[in-house]
Amino acid sequence: MSETRHAEIAGAGFAGLASAIALKQRGWSVRVHESSPELRAFGAGIYIWDNGLHVLDSLDAYQQVLNGAFAAPAYETRTNGVRLSYQRINQPGYRRLLTMTRQHLYEAMLDSARRHGIEIVTRSEVVAADPEGRLKVADGRWFEADLVIGADGVKSKVRDSLDIPLERQRYHDGLTRVLAPRGPLKGGDWDNVIDFWHKGEDGRTLRILYTPCSEDTLYMAMMAGLDDHEAAAIPVNPAPWVEAFPGLRPALESLGDRGRYDLYEKTVLKEWAIGKVAVVGDSAHAMPPTLAQGAGCAMMNALGLAVAMEESDTVEEGLALWQQRERPLTDHTQGRAAELAASRELAHGMSWSDTDMRAAGHLPTGTSAAFSA
Ligand SMILES: Cc1cc2nc3c(=O)[nH]c(=O)nc-3n(C[C@H](O)[C@H](O)[C@H](O)COP(=O)(O)OP(=O)(O)OC[C@H]3O[C@@H](n4cnc5c(N)ncnc54)[C@H](O)[C@@H]3O)c2cc1C
């Protein structure tokens, strides 16, 4: 096709920005609608494995991500004070996993979007899409496109307007995510990612995924069951956490009113596309964060979508190719993440099996094996 094709995208999150950049790089014009008044990520950290780093490289955002992200030398699991697994990372011959604040990742992607001249409209809430290739915003206007993308997150209005069968599952566990100053928690083992578990004699299970995400900033993902009102409370009540993890006291007592609790959730959409509309990211396949691959898969699928469009004569053919090529890995990853969430099996140590690491070790469509920064 010679004339410029146009995409309207709902959501300027990781999936929406990745879709926009990847399409723009392939000659499309794109407009992104974001319902929030500001373009920013909320205050938490994020893990990006090798697959996501490859995508960021292809989106021209990797170097900025690298500058200010954290490369821990090891990933360990300690349950009731006993080290159960220890794996080197970010060293020659080992897996790559960068940790960073969400805002750091978001800014790198946003800056790339701006360099590519992408139009992002804030305070533009999308309320529906139609398979003919139209997107509707809250003030009643319709925008026409060759391709419409619903990248509007787990509560997607685009998805819900399309009448595609959806299975939704919520889990018993959730995570409070917070950023804190690292303070004295620096150097030696404190530079590792440490998955701390506490299994009390009273049956209580708590977990803190301790994550340095820059020289000065610590990210803690604090798992508690929804019915553990004391530990799942926001603002964080430090008492039960300090009792379970006394070594983290300095960070736990510095939290103030920060933190946000989200339950683990999984959504499975029967089809990721209908007509000229694609559903990308959490709107299509939210998953429990046990493998830290939600954003990784979202970005892989966004890039894979643009590549499939480039390889196909029509949007419909491209969408079919996209689903056929990208969906099996996401389904596998989502399924395994859900098993780990239901079983709390990570308390026995992180498995580095090919099954669990399939997405992390995957070379995404549209990326180059030559990249190894
Ligand atoms: C506790 C937890 C920890 C996680 N940790 C990791 C991790 O370490 N690594 C990882 O890879 N993944 C992780 N994830 C998953 C990751 O956060 C998501 O998969 C990722 O954010 C999905 O990106 P998205 O762009 O699809 O959705 P979102 O990030 O939700 O972005 C959606 C965007 O759309 C906007 N929007 C919403 N509705 C509308 C509308 N109607 N109109 C216009 N705009 C709209 C929103 O404001 C937002 O900007 C975690 C998830 C959870 C819950």
Image: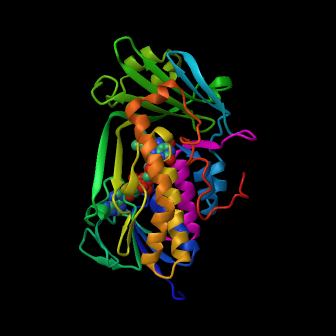
In the picture, measured across the screen, residue 193 lies left or right of residue 127, that is right
> Residue shown at 30%/22% (left/top)?
230
The x and y percentages for residue 334 are 43, 47
Residue 29 shows in the view: yes
Q: Looking at the image, which residue is at 32% across and 79% down? A: 132
> Residue 112: within the magenta?
yes
> Residue reaching furthest right?
92
Which residue occupies the extreme top position in the image? 201
Q: Is residue 158 magenta?
A: no
For the question of whether residue 41 can be seen, the reply is no
**Image position of 29 with respect to 102: above or below:** below
Image coordinates for residue 157, horizontal then vertical, percent: 29, 61
Quarter of the image where one finds residue 357: top right
Residue depicted at x 55% and y 70%: 307
Color scheme of the displayed model: rainbow
**In the picture shown, does residue 93 fall above or below 230?**
below
Which region shows up in magenta? 91-118
Q: Nearer the viewer, residue 142 or 131?
A: 131
| Quarter assignment of residue 278 | bottom left
Residue most extreme to the bottom = 2
Give the residue displayed 44% in from the left and 41% down from the top: 337
Q: Does 285 sit left or right of 179 as displayed?
A: left
Across and down, in percent, residue 101 comes to 53, 43
Q: Position of residue 270 (x, y in %)?
A: 33, 59
User: In the drawing, does residue 236 fall left or right of residue 329?
Assistant: left
| 66 relative to 141 in the view: left or right | right
